[in-house]
Amino acid sequence: MGNSLVPLSSSRKPVARAALVDLQEPSRNLLSECFRQFGIDAISMNSDHAARLSKEKFEACVVRVGSHAEGVLESVRGSRSNNRMVVYGLGGSVKDAMRLSKYGLNAVFQEPLERPTALKLVKATQMLVLHEFRRYVRIPVMTEVSITAGQAHFSATSVEVSSGGMSLKTAEDVSTGQPLEVSFSLLTLPRIWVRGHVSWHKPGQKIFGVRFDLRDQRRLRIKEWVESYLES
């Protein structure tokens, strides 16, 4: 399975840079290899990361989810050159990741790191890192989503968002075609509410897709945010 995820051009010259911030050597080495196979050069950083991330241009960064992550992400999102970079977390729980959602955490590498899983995540997000936006219309981003389905109210975690819908993870049961309303915020997008319905679901993985209601004009704010994000 792992070999099927390796692109044919795995030795191509890097055209983008990802900062690996305060990672242990095994994680550093594995992620460097994964990024390199998709044309992304991994730069390891330690105590000087804040200064470098505020001055140098990077297309992505990986930061350990924990007490020091907020300072790193504040530096990233406060930088004129890096405020739209793809941000990956490493480790931590979903609750830990949700505390960082205000910084636009895009995806999380789970620990213990395994090469096939790490490669799959890099492959899924590489177009965004490489700015090949015409081939990537879904933005991976983690944020807490409140859902109202009839009389039921529950929470989910976003996986990807597009102008037409989003995919989410939740422990709650949903069914295809089920109408609902979602509420969430994303970086520069204040909290928004929009109606939709469950367009697909994978019960075993607790993941499902929501298609926004075309009659709900509030979805246009999401479309504007997605277009702005991709053009920045």
Image (tube, helix red, strand yellow):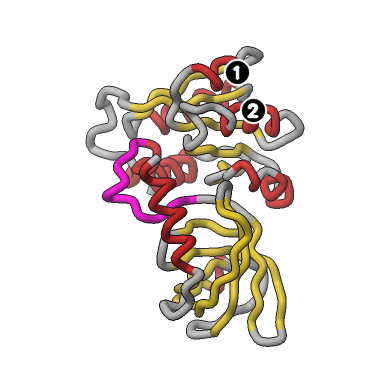
Residue 52 lies in magenta, yes or no?
A: no
Drawn side of residue 103 relative to residue 202, left or right: right
| Amino acid type, mark 2 | Val
User: Could you tell me residue 4's position as x and y percent?
Assistant: 32, 46
Instruction: For the C terminus, give its image quadrant.
Output: top left
Drawn side of residue 65 relative to residue 199, left or right: right
Q: Which image quarter: residue 223? A: bottom left
101 shown above or below 181: above
Q: Earlier in the sequence, mark 1 or mark 2?
A: 1
Label of residue 72 in the image: 2
Q: Residue placed at 47% from the left, 58% from the top?
A: 161
Q: Are marks 1 and 2 in contact (CB under 8 Å)?
A: yes
Drawn side of residue 33 relative to residue 133, left or right: right
Magenta segment boundaries in residue numbering: 130-140
Which residue is situated farthest in the top direction here? 48
Label of residue 49 in the image: 1
| Amino acid type, mark 1 | His
